[in-house]
Image (cartoon, coloured by chain):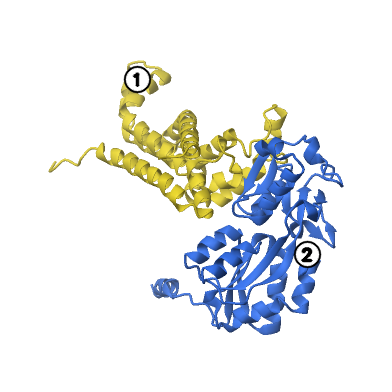
Chain colours: A blue, B yellow
Amino acid sequence: MKCLITLILSLLAVVTAHADEVQVAVAANFTGPMQVISVLFERDTGHKASLSYGSTGKFYAQIVNGAPFQVLLAADDETPAKLIKEGKTVAGTAFTYAIGKLVLWSADPKLIDAKGEVLKKGGFKHLSLANPKTAPYGAAGLQVMSKLGVADAIKPLIVQGENISQTHQFISTGAAELGFVAYSQVIKNGTIGSGSGWIVPANLYDPIRQDAVLLAKGKDKPAAVALMNYLKGEKALAVIKSFGYELR
Amino acid sequence: MLTDSDLQAIWLTTRLAGITTVILLLVGTPIAWLLARSRSWWKGPLGAVVALPLVLPPSVLGFYLLLAMGPQGPVGQLTASLGLGVLPFTFWGLVVASSFYSLPFMVQPLQNAFESIGERPLEVAATLRASPLDTFFSVVLPLAKPGFITAGVLTFAHTVGEFGVVLMIGGNIPGVTRVASVQIYDHVEALEYADAHRLAAVMLAFSFTVLLAMYLRRPKPTRGD
């Protein structure tokens, strides 16, 4: 009986975030580097970073509707700009923390050639793409196909991932033969780790400037401010670069 | 009021739920019968397997279905060798997934209905020399009719309400796998709240009507004895 009461009480206990914990909304493509950075951040500053991963569009909706995030690491610069306009951020804190690279990738080591000709040749049933309405990498993929003049031919073959992580999962399980993902998701030791891929030339899509911004809920929160600074530091930049991002 | 893509999503959802219900009527009835009648040791494990989708997160079901039906999975290799292609991102893939997902909603009401018939009518039928099949169709089916209606309606409605599994294996393709629930999610994600409201209201009205109809036609408890 005593055990049961203790259990119930502990379930009822209010879960409070530590004062020195920062709630971060992380664009799904930045999952890998952020996992590494958060460990370094915790070790170097003693603050804790609690990370949520998802599509930038979804985070926007959640933040507008009162989500408790203190820092947003977006996959674009438009979403932070919108939030700034709507007064949901701390003025003057936005900066570009990484510039993303798009990759056409397949788990099949032979499917994708060095020039991405496979898009014109076809021979696949499904091409996985993050929802272009909410995920910047999805929009970039669509743009690449339009520029190459293959958008109409490929549109019926597109399967949409809810965010870039699910898009990657569709391809890595082989359910879709190929698709557009972030370079950071497939990079290993400075090159594409498995399968085959084509790093899409930067002139085929608008640069994916990924901006970070301190949100209104992170105002004057030491951990949130510390994280924003940490992301500009040498250690974080080295991690970001090692995942194939360009730096500003 | 509803856009073409909304209507497309609703029609797709209806088709998915309808086909799933028919398949589960055919598959679920013998399973429910076994569960209701058998005294074998495997009755427990079978019942547990049937009930699994009730407690499993859709993400677990979706994950395993994606792996199993993908080109490297056992189901995927089977369907590919039969010349059917692979099932993820297809309408029939959703049908297979929904059939697993909604299985308990078909089997459990049927099992209850079969159990409540009891042994007696079956014994009487047997003494009248009715074959087991004949017994099933002329004794069990009429007696279990309310159970069939409940099971069918619940299965249909539950499939209409499916979301997580579809999201994981559907790929959100208009007219193929973008069912109403996913369409609503898409609208909400893109902040198209007006569009989301329209379709969400239809879903709400549908679900309420279905449940209301079911509760209204339940026999009322009689007073006294």
Q: Which residue is located at x 58 percent, y 33 percent?
A: B92
Q: Which residue is located at x 58 percent, y 51 percent?
A: B60
- The residue to which callout 1 is attached is B138
Residue B90: x and y, percent?
Answer: 61, 35
Is residue A121 in sight in this rendering? yes
Q: Residue furthest left?
A: B224
Q: Is residue B115 left or right of residue A78?
A: left
Query: Label 1 neighbourhood size at 10 Å, few (<14), some (14-19), many (20+)?
Result: few
Q: Nearer the viewer, residue A78 or A56?
A: A78
Q: Which residue is located at x 55 percent, y 59 percent?
A: A58
On the rendered image, what quadrant is the C terminus of chain B found in?
A: top left
On the rendered image, what quadrant is the N terminus of chain B found in?
A: top left
Parent chain of label 2: A
Residue A164 in which image quadrant? bottom right
- The residue to which callout 2 is attached is A243
Query: Label 2 neighbourhood size at 10 Å, few (<14), some (14-19), many (20+)?
Result: many
